[in-house]
Image (cartoon, coloured by chain):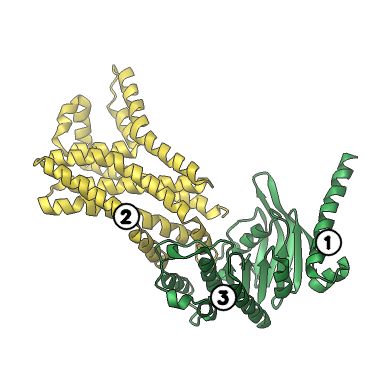
Amino acid sequence: MFKLLKYALYDIVKSRFALLYTLFMVLVAISIYQVSEDMSKVSLSLLNIMLMIVPLISAIFATTHFFNNLEFTELMLAQPVKRRDVFLSQVLAVMFVLSLAIVIGFGVPMILWGADSSVLILLGIGIGLSVVFAGLAFLASVLTRDKAKAIGISLSFWIYFSLVYDGFVLYLIYSLVDYPLEKPTLALVFLNPVDLGRIIMLMQLDISALMGYTGAFFQDFFGSAKGILLSSAVMFIWMILPVSAAMRVFKRKDF
Amino acid sequence: MISVQQIHKKFGKLEVLKDFNLEFESGKSYALMGPNGSGKTTLIKIILGMVIPNAGDILVKGKSIKGSYSYRSDIGYMPQIGRYPDNIKIGQLFSMMQDMRPEIREYDMALATEFGLMDMLDKPMHTLSGGTRQKVSASLAFMFCPDILILDEPTAGLDPIAVEILKNKIIQEREKGKLILITSHILSELDELTNHAIYIHEGKIFFNDTTESLKDITGESKFTTAIARLMEWSLKKKQIKTELSHV
């Protein structure tokens, strides 16, 4: 398992993609740090960029990586190794490189210009989202035999969680504005990893005061130990679920 | 050594293999033939555990392959198209494969040496031509002196010198008493390398015997014409079937 992982990692780290992605992250972080001195503004700007870019890149990269390595995966399956190990080595290598790019990309400017706890949480959310969307991308990849179709499905995951879902939630809130909606919105937030990341992060900043009664309710919930525990648990489920579903399919897949 | 028992495989609605039974014995070399889409590659992939059959079982050295992976260390497999991670070097690929079989300590690098791969261990895989990649695949299949060799179109894309080297190696291994299974569309090659012919037609075995008896039955003295005759027969049989179904 670790032997396979070692070579899979080596292959991705050596690829141009890993370098470009890290470089891009560094550039984004540096430019935002240059604009403002206020740490909470910096982390808010980084958050907004990250919530759009990270899921998109993770989904696309994981899918193309799976299909580029398909023939090699087949050859691995003909060797005396477990199917589970072949799959996990690919997935973990992708997730590791995506997370590493965020840690280095956002971490280097932090070391240079300082950071507070909110930026560390931002890093955690970035890694979480990379894992979630890489997992969803692998699920899309094992379910189809066609690269274009798999990329399409991965992209629609991204569009759904980043754009469509928010529209749906807004519509619901506006049409049910006369009812107490705190708890239903909380449940809805848990059903979307991107929103979950956003809310966890926003609650670390002071701007939640601007969000009215629901904001206060969220602040109360996500500020408490129970809330932090629950929200990280839900994020964790989001990280595990797609990958384990993909592994189940992979174990029975015909190559 | 390999026993294929009642294998049944469907892809969607398409039945590729139906109640398929076959025995491969060690010391023999088999030519697996059949028109495109007849189920040759599917059969090989089922033996290797890459495709999972709907029903039936495969025994390798008397043990079922269901849920097992260690049996594959007895099999050297050369795929039709060998593609490898772009940024890994030839040397790293070799040591990676060696890492996967920790119980084997002695490696047969004869083929890699003869192909001249030992001088280019530092080259990343994406810089290699298709033929060189094919050489890498061949070297990997023979590296661990496996008891079973499965070669899927082994000479496709190789230059004539490399083809000769590979053929000699296959003959050498055959004489050591190993089980060799080759699919190819180059019939003259199969004639040289194998002594047992299996002809698959639409997921069923149409012919399974030694090459001598194939020549006897068809009444042809040359292997290639004998196979051509076999193909004609298999097509005729299908025609008769459709005619009957119209009645």
Callout 3 amino acid: Phe
Q: Nearer the viewer, residue A12 or A201?
A: A12
Same-chain check, marks 2 and 1: no
Subunit under mark 1: B
Work out how far the residue at label 2 is from the one at label 3, CA to CA, in angstroms: 34 Å
Relative placement, left or right, of B113 versus A36 is right
Under tag 2, what secondary structure? helix
Q: Tell me the residue that label 2 is attached to.
A: A18
Relative placement, left or right, of B225 versus A47 is right
Label 2: few (<14), some or many (≥20) within 10 Å?
A: some
Who's the residue at 17% across and 47% down the image?
Answer: A30
The C terminus of chain B appears in which quarter of the rendering? top right
Question: What shade has chain B been given?
Answer: green
The N terminus of chain B appears in which quarter of the rendering? bottom right
Work out how far the residue at label 2 is from the one at label 1, CA to CA, in angstroms: 56 Å
- Image coordinates of residue A150 in percent, x first then y, are 47, 44
**Residue lying farthest to the top in this orientation:** A178
Q: Is residue B225 above or below residue B172?
A: above
Q: Which of B42 and A246 is in front in this view?
A: B42
Under tag 1, what secondary structure? helix
Nearest to N terminus: mark 3 or mark 1: 3
Quarter of the image holding residue B185?
A: bottom right
Specify whether residue B2 is in view.
Answer: yes
Who's the residue at 58% across and 76% down the image?
Answer: B146
Quarter of the image holding residue A52?
A: top left
Q: Tell me the residue that label 3 is attached to.
A: B142
Label 3: few (<14), some or many (≥20) within 10 Å?
A: many
Work out how far the residue at label 3 is from the one at label 1, CA to CA, in angstroms: 34 Å
| The chain coloured yellow in the image | A
